[in-house]
Image (tube, grey):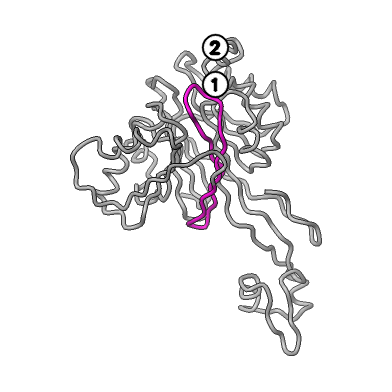
C-alpha cells in the first residue's frame, strides 16, 4: 500500500447493491490512517482491500445516518480482537454522540481497544499523529459535518543553495528540522536554502446540499472526496433531501480549486457510473474528476512546488 493513498471501500448510498457496498473510505497519509464514514460491512471491505484494522488511527463520522456509521461496531470490535496498541480517535458531530456511544457497545465483547470519542462542532480543529483535522457544517436533513485533513507544512531544500551556504550531509536534515544551524562562524537559516511548501490537504464532503461549508472544506484541496448521490434528472429530489448531483459535485470541486476530485455515494437507482462521469465532465471539463467503484485506489497528489522565494500556497 502506498503511503499516500485513498481507497473507496464502499460507494453506495442508502441501499447497497450487488456491486456497491455501503459507503466507507480509507485514507492513508504518511503512515497515518483515517477511516471515513464506515457504513455496514466495512470490516469485510477492509479485508478485501488488504487493510488491517491496526492501520486506522482516526475514524471520522459525518452524521448519524446508518449508511455512514453502522460499520463502526465491527471495526472497533476487530480492533479489540487484534489488540491494536495505539489509540483510535472517533470524531463525530455532537448531535451524533448518543448514536456513536450506542454503536460502540452494540454487542458483548472484550472492549480492550483504546477508543477515544471526540464530539466535534463546526469549526473545531484537532491536531495529532502529524495531521490536523478541521470541520465545517454541511447542509443535510440531520446535523452533519465534513472534514479537512492536512499534513504539516514543510520546506523543500534547494541543493544548489545548500551547497553554496556550505550545508552538507546530515546538516541539511538538521537545518530543515531545527530552522537554523551554525556553519563555522555563520548562522544559516532554512529560509536561505529552502522554499516553504504547504502540507497535503484532503477534503471529505458527504451528504450535503450546496453550501458554504462544503466550499470551505474543499478550498484548494489536493484531493476532494465528495458525494454525488444523484444525476441532474433528480436535481429536485437532491435539493429536497440534502444531496448533490454529479454535476453539482464537479462544479463544487472546480469552484473550490480542488486539484483532484473523487465522486462516491451513488444511489442504487444507477447501475453504472457512466452517467455520473459524463455529467461531471460536462459540468467541469478541465477538472481531474473520477467516479469511484468499490475498492478503487487513488493516489493523493502532492502539493504544487512553490518557486524559490515565493510565499507558500494558502492552506
Residue lying furthest bottom: 185
Q: Is residue 2 visible?
A: yes
Q: CA distance from mark 1 to mark 2?
A: 8 Å
In the image, the segment drawn in magenta is 125-148
State if disc 2 and disc 1 touch (CB < 8 Å).
yes
Observer-nearest of 34 and 148: 148
* Image height of 193 relative to 42, above or below: below
Q: Secondary structure at mark 2?
A: helix
Q: Answer with the quarter of the image where residue 108 lies.
A: top left
Q: Is residue 299 visible?
A: no
Q: Tag 2 or tag 1, which sits nearer the N-term?
A: 2
Q: Is residue 229 left or right of residue 20?
A: right
State the image coordinates of residue 98 (x, y, percent, origin top left). 34, 34
Q: Answer with the quarter of the image where residue 227 lies.
A: top right
Q: Which mark is residue 300?
A: none
Observer-nearest of 109 and 267: 109
Q: Main SS type for the magenta part? A: strand
* Image height of 273 relative to 225, above or below: above
Q: Which mark is residue 237?
A: 2
* Image height of 119 relative to 20, above or below: below
Q: Is residue 75 left or right of residue 183?
A: left
Q: Residue at 74%, 82% (x, y): give it.
A: 187
Q: How many numbered badges does the structure rendering display? A: 2
State the image coordinates of residue 79 (x, y, percent, origin top left). 29, 48
Q: How many neighbours does mark 2 have within 10 angstroms: few (below 14), some (14-19), or many (20 or more)?
A: some
Residue 137 within the segment the image draws in magenta? yes
Q: Residue at 29%, 40% (x, y): give it.
A: 104
Q: Secondary structure at mark 1?
A: loop
Q: Is residue 291 left or right of residue 286?
A: left
- Which residue is denoted by mark 1 in the rendering? 243
Observer-nearest of 264 and 37: 37
State the image coordinates of residue 81 (x, y, percent, origin top left). 23, 48
Amino acid at each position: 500500500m502506498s503511503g499516500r493513498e485513498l481507497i473507496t471501500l464502499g460507494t453506495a448510498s442508502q441501499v447497497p447493491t450487488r456491486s456497491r457496498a455501503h459507503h466507507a473510505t480509507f485514507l492513508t497519509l504518511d503512515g497515518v490512517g483515517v477511516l471515513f464514514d464506515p457504513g455496514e460491512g466495512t470490516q469485510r471491505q477492509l479485508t478485501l482491500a488488504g487493510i488491517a484494522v491496526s492501520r486506522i488511527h482516526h475514524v471520522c463520522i459525518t452524521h448519524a445516518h446508518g449508511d455512514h456509521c453502522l460499520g463502526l461496531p465491527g471495526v472497533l470490535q476487530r480492533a479489540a480482537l487484534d489488540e491494536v496498541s495505539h489509540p483510535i480517535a472517533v470524531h463525530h458531530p455532537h448531535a451524533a454522540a448518543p448514536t456513536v456511544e450506542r454503536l460502540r457497545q452494540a454487542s458483548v465483547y472484550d472492549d480492550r481497544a483504546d477508543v477515544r470519542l471526540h464530539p466535534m462542532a463546526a469549526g473545531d480543529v484537532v491536531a495529532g499523529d502529524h495531521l490536523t483535522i478541521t470541520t465545517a457544517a454541511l447542509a443535510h436533513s440531520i446535523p452533519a459535518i465534513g472534514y479537512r485533513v492536512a499534513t504539516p507544512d514543510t520546506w523543500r531544500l534547494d541543493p544548489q543553495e545548500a551547497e553554496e551556504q556550505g550545508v552538507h550531509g546530515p546538516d541539511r536534515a538538521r537545518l530543515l528540522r531545527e530552522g537554523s544551524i551554525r556553519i563555522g562562524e555563520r548562522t544559516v537559516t532554512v529560509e536561505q536554502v529552502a522554499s516553504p511548501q504547504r502540507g497535503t490537504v484532503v477534503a471529505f464532503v458527504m451528504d450535503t446540499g450546496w453550501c458554504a461549508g462544503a466550499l470551505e472544506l474543499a478550498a484548494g484541496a489536493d484531493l476532494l472526496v465528495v458525494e454525488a448521490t444523484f444525476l441532474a434528472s433528480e436535481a429536485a429530489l437532491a435539493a429536497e433531501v440534502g444531496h448533490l448531483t454529479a454535476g453539482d459535485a464537479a462544479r463544487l470541486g472546480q469552484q473550490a480549486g480542488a486539484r483532484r476530485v473523487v465522486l462516491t455515494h451513488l444511489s442504487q437507482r444507477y447501475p453504472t457510473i457512466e452517467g455520473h462521469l459524463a455529467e461531471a465532465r460536462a459540468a467541469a471539463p478541465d477538472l481531474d474528476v473520477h467516479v469511484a467503484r468499490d475498492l478503487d485506489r487513488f493516489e493523493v497528489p502532492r502539493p504544487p512546488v512553490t518557486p524559490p522565494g515565493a510565499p507558500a500556497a494558502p492552506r
